[in-house]
Amino acid sequence: MSAQLLAGKKGIIFGALNSESIAWKVAEAAHAHGAKFTLTNAPIAMRMGELNGLAEKTGSKVIPADATSMEDLEKLFRESQEILGGKLDFVLHSIGMSVNVRKGKHYTDLNYDWLQKGWDVSAVSFHKVLQTAWKLDSMNEWGSILALTYMAAQRTFPDYNDMADNKAYLESIARSFGYHFGVEKKVRVNTISQSPTMTTAGSGVKGFDGFIKYAEDMSPLGNATAEDCANYCITLFSDLTKRVTMQNLFHDGGFSNMGVSNLVMQQFMKEK
Ligand SMILES: NC(=O)c1ccc[n+]([C@@H]2O[C@H](COP(=O)([O-])OP(=O)(O)OC[C@H]3O[C@@H](n4cnc5c(N)ncnc54)[C@H](O)[C@@H]3O)[C@@H](O)[C@H]2O)c1
């Protein structure tokens, strides 16, 4: 590693479930860049036990927390600050789940109890994380808080279902809370809009295999991988991006500005 962009920085990383998870790659990259952090996930996800391996590898402690529980979050932030020895410089929110997607409920026939659960886990939890950090005054000046999102917040991808609405809400929270965090605490709040990526959450979306190939062929630079995303997160946690805030940052190999690519067009052209 040539530069240690996060040397001396402390943080919390939410959402590493297994080695495919984007948060897992972020933890590995943050460790390589000299950061110290705690790892957290929902108590139910802990049962799979994989997180302990990552904790060992990165010299981190694991603190279970359901990101929808203010009590769990307060405990997580307090303990993290104790373990790491002071205020935090970065937080990654890498959490998403829709019960309607999981159970194959169509968007025109949503179950609203499930919708509320998914909205709470995928979107409101980001407000809860921000509010906890705000009230406990957990962040150092020029700290950086990031959440991961997807372009279905702006454009229609039918099978993304109610997650599209959750992501629109999540991105709005980054702007709204980003204002307050900027003015009063000099802390950045952004979302990264990542390419489709083969993870547990990603592959839960219907037709994901075909879609990932389509996105690959549409993107001039190809799909951004989970490792690419981790590297982008490191730059946004570092001091090199101090005045980037309240942004939704597309990290997608160019997909979001494409109309159509030659590779995709070839599949619709008649042979002459
Ligand atoms: N995979 C993709 O194609 C893709 C694309 C763009 C954005 N994203 C976003 O990236 C983020 C990470 O997803 P991933 O693809 O790495 O999948 P993943 O399944 O590895 O991660 C999702 C995480 O959310 C956690 N989680 C669920 N409920 C929780 C709760 N109540 N409290 C705390 N944690 C909870 C899960 O345990 C899991 O670790 C999500 O926000 C996802 O929407 C993913």
Image: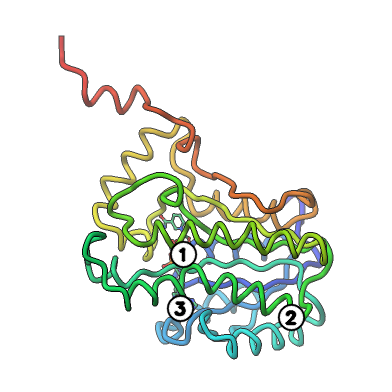
Q: Which amino acid does the dot numbered 2 rest on?
A: Lys
Which residue sits at x=51%, y=81%? 68
Which residue sits at x=79%, y=78%? 137
Instruction: Name the residue tied to disc 2.
Output: 135
Q: In the image, ligand 1 is in what quadrant?
A: bottom left
Q: Earlier in the sequence, mark 2 or mark 3?
A: 3
Instruction: Name the residue tied to disc 3.
Output: 50
Q: Which mark is residue 223?
A: none
Residue 153 placement (x, y as % from top left): 45, 52
In this rendering, position of residue 67 left or right of residue 180: left
Asked if labels 1 and 2 touch by Cβ distance under 8 angstroms, the answer is no
Asked if ligand 1 lies within 8 A of label 1, the reply is yes
Of tags 2 and 1, the one toward the viewer is 2
Of tags 3 and 1, the one toward the viewer is 1
- Mark 3 burial class by Cα count in 10 Å: few <14, some 14-19, many 20+: some
In this rendering, position of residue 2 left or right of residue 268: right
**Figure coloring:** rainbow
Say which element carries label 1: loop
- Mark 2 burial class by Cα count in 10 Å: few <14, some 14-19, many 20+: few
Instruction: Name the residue tied to disc 1.
Output: 21
Residue 140 placement (x, y as % from top left): 82, 69
